Amino acid sequence: MRIHVVDHPLVAHKLSTLRDERTDSPTFRRLADELVTLLAYEATRDVLVDQVVLRTPVSETTGVKLSYPRPLVVPILRAGLGMLDGMVRLLPTAEVGFLGMIRDEGTLQPSTYATRMPDDLTGRQAYVLDPMLATGGTLVAATQLLIDRGARDVTALCLLAAPEGVALMQEAFKDSSVPVTVVTAAVDERLNEHGYIVPGLGDAGDRLYGTA
Ligand code: URA
């Protein structure tokens, strides 16, 4: 498993405003959207392209087009939905699948309550959207599901990560023949006893959807 922490002043600026408890939901949604697009730029570094021949108004030349089979983007419900627009803006050919996962706040174990994506992902590049890599249980389960369906590689985009979640992903996929990458804006200090990332930004779903 490869982790890529995007080190850029614009990313740090947007993340700082997302962390600030005074940031209201509309601003949080907009900034999360912008931040995802910046993460998506890094996360799609290895997206497959085909060579094409085209004509400019001046001459013939060669270029590239996003390849087929189409990449699959999978937001994990509910908070991952807040990352979808920012991702597909950069990957307009992507197909979108959905994964409903919830973690039990007592045991912190994930369970799947909805799956809407192709059964066969052979040869497809998959991008998972999950804003908070906390204990890592949800992301490990989602990544494994995509690998089991044949994904060629899996890249997770997370606004923030905890060292515990990164370690669980590393352990789970250390021998994986399918490349797994996590792209995030920061790895924070730790998880607290309630499974929240410290300093973090609170409950991403609540802050996105104004339920805090
Ligand atoms: N999920 C969140 O929304 N926030 C955290 O800090 C951890 C998990």
Image: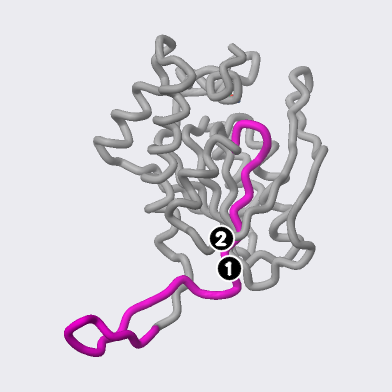
Callout 1, which amino acid?
Arg
Mark 2 or mark 1, earlier in chain: 1
Q: How packed is label 1: few (under 14 Cα within 10 Å), some, or many (20 or more)?
A: some
Query: Residue 131, percent across and down?
Result: 54, 34
Tell whether position 77 is magenta. yes
Callout 2, which amino acid?
Ala
Q: How packed is label 2: few (under 14 Cα within 10 Å), some, or many (20 or more)?
A: many
In this rendered view, identify the residue nearer to me: 32 or 198: 32
Disc 2, SS: loop
Disc 2 target residue:
94
What segment is highlighted magenta in the picture?
A: 52-80
Q: Residue furthest left?
A: 58
| Looking at the image, residue 9 lies above or below residue 120 | above
> Could you tell me which residue is drawn at 68 percent across and 36 percent down?
77
Q: Residue furthest front?
A: 57
Tell whether position 174 is magenta. no
Disc 1 target residue:
70
Q: What separation in Å lies between label 2 and label 1 (alpha carbons)? A: 5 Å
Disc 1 CB within 8 Å of nearest ligand 1 atom: no
**Count of labels in the image:** 2
**Residues at badges 2 and 1 in contact (C-beta under 8 Å)?**
yes
Disc 1, SS: loop
Query: Residue 190, percent across and down?
Result: 51, 23
> Could you tell me which residue is drawn at 74 percent across and 36 percent down?
101
Q: Quadrant of residue 129?
A: top right
Query: Residue 33, percent across and down?
Result: 44, 37
> Could you tell me which residue is drawn at 35 percent across and 43 percent down?
6
| Looking at the image, residue 56 lies above or below residue 165 | below
| Looking at the image, residue 104 lies above or below residue 174 | above
